[in-house]
Amino acid sequence: MKRRTFMTGGIAALGLAGAAWATGSFGPIFTDGAAPLSANSFSTALPIPPLLEDLDSAADSVRFVLQVQQGSRSFFPGKTTRTLGYNGNFLGPTIRVRNGQRFRAEIKNGLSQTTTLHWHGLHLPAKWDGGPLQPIPADSSWNPDFTIKQQAATLWYHPHAMGLTGDQVYRGLAGLFIIEDELSDRLDIPKDYGKDDIPLIIQDRRFLKSGQFAYVQNMHDQMNGVIGNHLLINGVMQPVLGVHAGPVRLRLLNGSNSSIYKIAFANQQSFRMIASDGGFLERPLAMNRIVLSAGERAEVLVDFSAAPIGQQVSLLVDQVRGSRFEALRIQVDRPAETAIKLPTRLRSFDRIPATEATVKRSFVLESIGMGIVGGGLSINGKKMDLNRIDERVKLGATEIWEIINRSTIMMRTSHSMHLHDVQFQILDRDGKAPPAHEQGRKDTVLIAPGETVRIITRFHDDPGVYMYHCHLLEHEDDGMMGQFEVVES
């Protein structure tokens, strides 16, 4: 398998066998024969998802209300698209909490179908996980109540209803979930949300000529995921972000259904990655490109101190087997507002030694051509069954999970693996140490065709049933998912 170098400083990027970074159009994916629609180019300020109001006045607890609702949004002049959102028409507010706080929420389902709300990346009791086992029927509510027990990180929330996840996320159900702690308070990094601490939710979509989302799946979509030919940043196309002439923190979320993104600046400007899925890395890493699969996050610092007022730089997003997008224009529009001396070290990291593991498990992700008898998507030859527990894990155990992407020659499909409840560490890729940016805490990992990835994690508390699955949502909905139960004995 060939590997490309996507980062400076000698850091090897994630290899994507057989993938080409195309610069042409993905093509007109309109089921009723429409030509691609056009939007106003770079005429809209980047919207910042508002912070969700805490309804609790106590310092040691928070209480939130989220209304799952139908809405509409105009993505193109003269066209109105039917959407879904949390407390609004599309996407949802950012939830911000602190480690150690009691978290309570009321999730009201105003839809005509069942949904759930999964806290992606959170360590929490199984009954509040928000997966398929915790459905919220139409016109009902769900009231999770648990304590935040993990370090500062950029997480997110989205639906996880059985067979409905891809459709509901596509129509707009997603939002960021930020945890802060004493370390994030102390670090001298940008932390003024919406000013120098900017969330970027990156998603691609395709549309019918009527302006409605074209979430109409065919065989190609089932095997490769629904890949769009329009790109949204925080729910709009081609926005502009004004920043100060100083360090800016970007919280990147690949919130797409199934796309894998390579993210870089058009002028090859370098940045420093400071956090992955589960929180801060040991030290900032100098890079100029990063690859994120669906569901993965990264926090990066970009220093505009040397940029003259008025300078613009474009953020480019490339899809695997898809299009290159000029996704966002960042313009330096004011002098530096804060003096920051960026740290050279972020945190001490508790690495789990492979020798600590007492159990090793293997998970084979298979893509067999549709139309073939027994074909489709599976893990260890099985499709998801809510009545079956696939793996039982002892409470307090440390385990190594070996994940093998055994796609066929004809269907060379990338997959990912997302574990609910726990953060893991990547031990190796095909026997080689992972690149430095993948050596932090993770909850989602991309596995290229033919690749084997080993991860290690501790199942240290919270017994109950959780999910593991491919986070390409069309694969998940097709049954590429299983259940593990953490048991006390």
Image (cartoon, grey):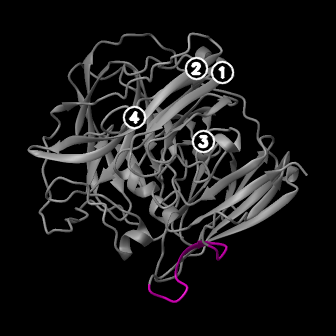
The residue located at (39%, 34%) in the rendering is 92
Depth check: give the residue in front, 392 or 299.
392
Name the residue tied to disc 1.
101
Viewer-nearest residue: 401 or 245: 401
Q: Amino acid at mark 3?
A: Gly
Find the distance from the CA under tag 4 to the CA under tag 1. 21 Å
User: Does dot 3 land on a helix, a strand or a loop?
Assistant: loop
SS assignment at label 1: loop
In this picture, which residue range is highlighted in magenta? 371-382
Mark 2–mark 1 contact, CB under 8 Å? yes
**Which callout, 4 or 3, points to the residue nearer the camera?**
4
Q: Is residue 440 visible?
A: no
Q: Residue at x 16, y 68 (%)?
A: 32
Toward the viewer: 3 or 205?
A: 205
Q: Which residue is the site of mark 3?
A: 121
Residue 441 is drawn in which quadrant? top right
Query: Which SS class for mark 2?
Result: strand
Q: Position of residue 72 (x, y in %)?
A: 24, 41
Secondary structure of the residue carrying tag 4 is: loop
Q: Residue furthest left?
A: 78
Q: Earlier in the sequence, mark 3 or mark 2?
A: 2
Indicate whether 11 appears above or below 367.
above
- Disc nearest the viewer among 3 and 2: 2
- Is 379 magenta? The answer is yes
Q: Earlier in the sequence, mark 4 or mark 1?
A: 4
Q: Which residue is disc 2 drawn over?
A: 62
Circles 4 and 3, Cβ within 8 Å, touching? The answer is: no
Distance between the Cα atoms at labels 3 and 2? 19 Å
Q: CA distance from mark 3 to mark 1?
A: 17 Å
* 399 drawn magenta: no
